[in-house]
Amino acid sequence: MNSRTPQLPPHVDLQPVLRSIPLFAPLPPDDIESLSRLIDIRVFPKNRTILHEADTANYMYLVLAGKVRVVQQGADGSEQVLAIHRKGAFFGEMALLDGRTSPATLMAHEDATVGLIARTTFESQILTNDRVLRQIISVLCGRLRESWFLMKLTRFPSAEQKIRGVLKYLGTQYGVDDSRGKILTIKLTHQTVASYASVSRETASRILGRFSRNGEIELLASRRMLLKPLLFHNPPYL
C-alpha cells in the first residue's frame, strides 16, 4: 500500500457513521461499538492513490467522507473510470471472500476519509452476521449492473453516444431532481467524463461544449453539471 497518510484525530466518533451505512445498520449497538474500535481511519487528498491492485486482498474499505473512484490504468498511463463511490460505499469484500486481488486501482476523487477493516475483523465481525451478508449480496448485484452498463457503453457506435450515455448513467446514480433537470452531486472534469467513455479528453471537451450550446447540459459552479430534459430525450436510451 502507498505510504501512510495522516489519520483523523482520535476523538472522532465512528459509531454514528457506521450506523448510517446500510451495510452495518443490522448490527446491534455492541457490535457497532466494537467494530468502530477496529477500523483504521486514513485521510487521502484529491487524486492520491488509496490502493493499487496488489494491495486489495488485505483490507475491506469504507468511504467515510468524500468520494473515491475505481479505475483501470493502461500501460501508457491512461485511466478508465469504472465507478465513483461516495460516503457509505464499501469495497474490497470480494478479495477477502475469494483471496484474489481486484483488477483495479482506487483513488481519491476528492479529499476523502477511508476506513480500513482488516481481514481478521471482516471474518469475525461481518461474515458471521446473515443480515450483513445479505447487504453485501445486494451491493454486489448493483456492481454487476454497473459492469453491464460499461460493456453496453463500449458498443455505442460514436463518441457522442458514449458521452451522452455516461451522463445519463451518472444522472441515475448521482442526480438530484431540480426544476431545470438533474444536478449531479459529484464534481466532473472533462477528463473524468472522457475516462468513463474511453475517449480522449479533447473529444469529450468538444462534445460537452456542443451539448452545452444545444441546451442539453449546463455547467454550474464548482464543476457541478445540470443535466437538462433534452439530454434524456436524445438517444441512446439506457
Image (tube, rainbow, N blue to C red):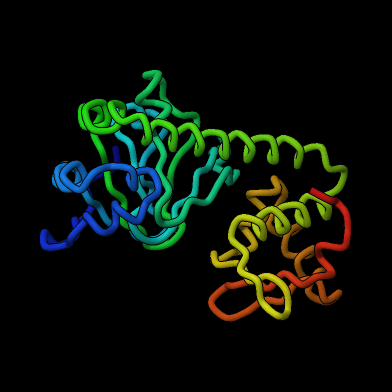
- The reply, left or right, for residue 144 in relation to residue 202 is left
Give the quadrant of residue 149. Answer: top right
Seen in the picture, residue 148 relative to 28 is either above or below; the reply is above
Seen in the picture, residue 219 relative to 38 is either above or below; the reply is below
Q: Nearer the viewer, residue 35 or 163?
A: 35
- The reply, left or right, for residue 82 in relation to residue 29 is right
Seen in the picture, residue 228 relative to 68 is either above or below; the reply is below
Residue 92 pos. (x, y %): 39, 34
Farthest-out residue, left: 10
Give the quadrant of residue 57. Answer: top left
Q: Nearer the viewer, residue 7 or 20?
A: 20
Number of numbered callouts drawn = 0
Q: Nearer the viewer, residue 203 or 210?
A: 210
The residue located at (31%, 56%) in the rendering is: 113
Seen in the picture, residue 175 relative to 98 is either above or below; the reply is below
Q: Quadrant of the N terminus?
A: top left
Residue 13 pos. (x, y %): 18, 60
Q: Nearer the viewer, residue 7 or 137?
A: 137
The residue located at (76%, 57%) in the rendering is: 203
The reply to whether residue 210 is visible in this rendering is: no
Residue 205 pos. (x, y %): 72, 64
The residue located at (33%, 44%) in the rendering is: 24
Residue 139 pos. (x, y %): 50, 39
- The reply, left or right, for residue 80 in relation to residue 216 is left
The residue located at (39%, 31%) in the rendering is: 133
- The reply, left or right, for residue 201 in relation to residue 111 is right
Give the quadrant of residue 163. Answer: bottom right
The reply to whether residue 91 is visible in this rendering is: yes
